[in-house]
Amino acid sequence: MVSSSSFYCFLPFLILIISYTQNPSNLFANGDMNLIQKTCKTTKFYDLCISSLESDSTSPQADTKGLAIIMARFAMANATNTNSFLSSSVLVKNNTSDSLMKKVLKQCANRYMAAGSSLQDSVKDLGSELYDYAYMHVMAAADYANSCHNAFKRYPNLIYPPEIAAREEGLKHICDVVMGIIDNLAY
């Protein structure tokens, strides 16, 4: 298992990406920091939820649905960043003769691309108040990350790189936070 500190190494980069790519729409209503704290208390990773939402300037004005969208965008940034990392790793590995490692890294990159697509769908579903579908797409994104790990398990001679393990754990944790927030919307 990867330590939480490994995940938090990636958090500032994710926050930076989100702050420059986020386009808050009319999905947000009036909210405040109390709503953020109340919402985050219902998730598995309170500290991650708080630190992520406090880093986004639109969070204090967001309602619960808006908070879920913000966190889903953090998850999308994580998946996209991991896909880029894995894709660049494939390019770096081109100088080696380990075609099996290249193959598995490419599979993993494709899985993280699919995770990003699922998370994009979840944002659309949240905007349309299709909370069950949004939840399903977030759950699928976390499973795509897990399938990368499983790809390495199929080949006992391949070692699952700790850098990928940390990214997997990070995405799963963010997805858990998103699902926890969506649970608040379903009622």
Image (cartoon, rainbow, N blue to C red):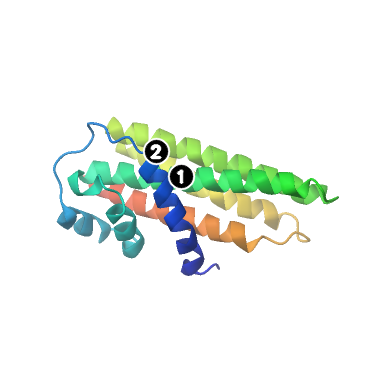
Q: Amino acid at mark 2?
A: Thr
Describe residue 74's horizontal placement relative to residue 35 as left or right: right
Residue 50 drawn above or below residue 139: below
Q: Amino acid at mark 1?
A: Ala
Residue that appears at 47% across and 67% down: 4
**Which residue, as the protein is rendered here, is positioned at the far right?**
97
Name the residue beneath numbered marker 1. Answer: 77
The label number, if any, that marks residue 21 in the structure image:
2
- Crowding at dot 2, Cα within 10 Å, few <14 / some 14-19 / many 20+, comes out as few
What x and y, as percent, mark residue 69? 32, 41
- Looking at marks 1 and 2 on the same chain, the residue that comes earlier in the sequence is marked by 2
Tell me the quarter of the image containing the N terminus.
bottom right
In this view of the protein, which residue sits in the foreground, 98 or 9? 9
Circles 1 and 2 in contact, beta carbons < 8 Å: yes
Describe residue 126's horizontal placement relative to residue 10 as left or right: left
Q: Nearer the viewer, mark 1 or mark 2?
A: 2
Residue that appears at 58% across and 44% down: 83
Q: Please indicate, yes or no, whether residue 124 appears anywhere in the rendered image.
A: yes
Residue 171 drawn above or below residue 87: below
What x and y, as percent, mark residue 73? 39, 43
Residue that appears at 33% across and 64% down: 47
Residue 99 drawn above or below residue 21: below
In this view of the protein, which residue sits in the foreground, 81 or 57? 57
Q: Secondary structure at mark 2?
A: helix
Q: Secondary structure at mark 1?
A: helix
The label number, if any, that marks residue 34 in the structure image:
none
Residue that appears at 28% across and 55% down: 54
Mark 1 → mark 2, Cα distance in angstroms? 9 Å
Residue 183 drawn above or below residue 23: below
What x and y, as percent, mark residue 162? 62, 63
Tell me the quarter of the image containing the C terminus.
top left
